Amino acid sequence: MVQRGSHHTNGLRRPFFAVKPLVETIPATAMNVHHLELFYYVARYGGISSAIRHMPYGIQQPAVSGQILALEAYLGQKLFYRRPFALTPGGERLYHFIQPFFGNLGQVADELRGHQTSRLRLAASSALLREYGPRLLNGLREQVPELKLVLRDANQTMAEAYLLSQEVDLAITELYAKPPAGLRHEPLVEAPLMLLVPATLATGDAQQLLAERPLPLISVPADTAIYKTFHDGLRKLGTEWEIGIELSNLEMVQTYVAAGFGIGLSLVTAGSTFGNGVRALPLKGHARLNIAAFWQEPVPRLAALFLDGVRRTARQVQMEIDAFAPEGKRGAR
């Protein structure tokens, strides 16, 4: 309400107006940055208990729960569901906003202190780590003699989780499905599938084995990209071949084939060699498995350096693979 009155200036009476302020109130508090940090760890590691185990300082679960509740009260909405853990749409939006800041604090601190990190955290399938890891990492070690490594065995799903939680800097593994938002990827190599057979088994080629299926199929699990790609190819042929013996990795597949337990599903790699008890039959005409690099921006300096080396090596590896299995179907799905 405007109030009228008078004011004396140099002996003259002048009216004055008491004007109501345009801004009546200012919020007493701003958003608590510590609450945001706690929420970042909870969202990154999928729950309060897991977040506490990964925080760089000690804090009790009731304290975290209380401060998260305070943040939710301030924002006027829930940020995640407790059991099972899942971010709400508001929680997703907040996490993606604060993640670049909290996720890169350590790296920025090292740069500001003049410390260039010499650690590379890499996720890759065990087959790739075995076949190509030393070859690729030797080149990086020549450029960074003080190189420290963290290597994790991972398929695509695991690699994506490691990247999104910032537990690794880079992943090199199979590409079967489109990666989630926030991750970038780059196809590197297309590798054909092959069947491994006991040397004592009389057979002509892989197509004959697919038609007759004389022994059980030995394979890595059905949810892996290798088996899914194999199954996609069989479906186009109008047939199926269920796993008879499921093993955790390709090395074990070769071992059990050599022992005569069945026919193994495997992947052609550059310079593939097998013992006397195993023969390899490439699956001609089948779709190839894509091997790709996955990362999240910004890429740490050492990971970017390693990725450049991977790109150069991938071209040579593709030529070596094509020489072993020249009739595989490139780019098919």
Image (cartoon, rainbow, N blue to C red):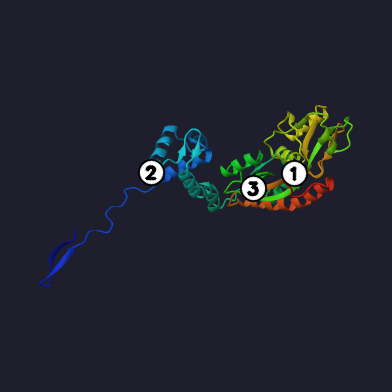
Expressed as whole percent of the image width and height from the top left, the position of residue 118 reads: 63, 47
Q: Kindly report the distance in space between the C-alpha atoms of the residues bearing marks 2 and 3.
A: 36 Å
Expressed as whole percent of the image width and height from the top left, the position of residue 206 reads: 84, 38
Pick the residue in front: 253 or 209: 209
For marks 2 and 1, the one nearer the N-term is: 2
Q: Which residue is mark 2?
A: 76
Q: Which residue is depicted at the point 66% across and 52% down?
A: 305
For marks 1 and 3, the one nearer the N-term is: 1
Mark 2 neighbour density, 10 Å: few (under 14) some (14–19) many (20 or more): few
Which amino acid lies under the numbered mark 3 shown in the image of this protein?
Answer: Phe
> Can residue 294 be seen here?
yes
For marks 2 and 3, the one nearer the N-term is: 2
Mark number for residue 132? 1
Single out the mark in the foreground, 1 or 3. 3
Mark 1 neighbour density, 10 Å: few (under 14) some (14–19) many (20 or more): some
- In the image, taking residue 136 as reference, residue 320 lies left or right, namely right
> Can residue 252 be seen here?
no
Which amino acid lies under the numbered mark 2 shown in the image of this protein?
Answer: Gly
State how many labels appear: 3
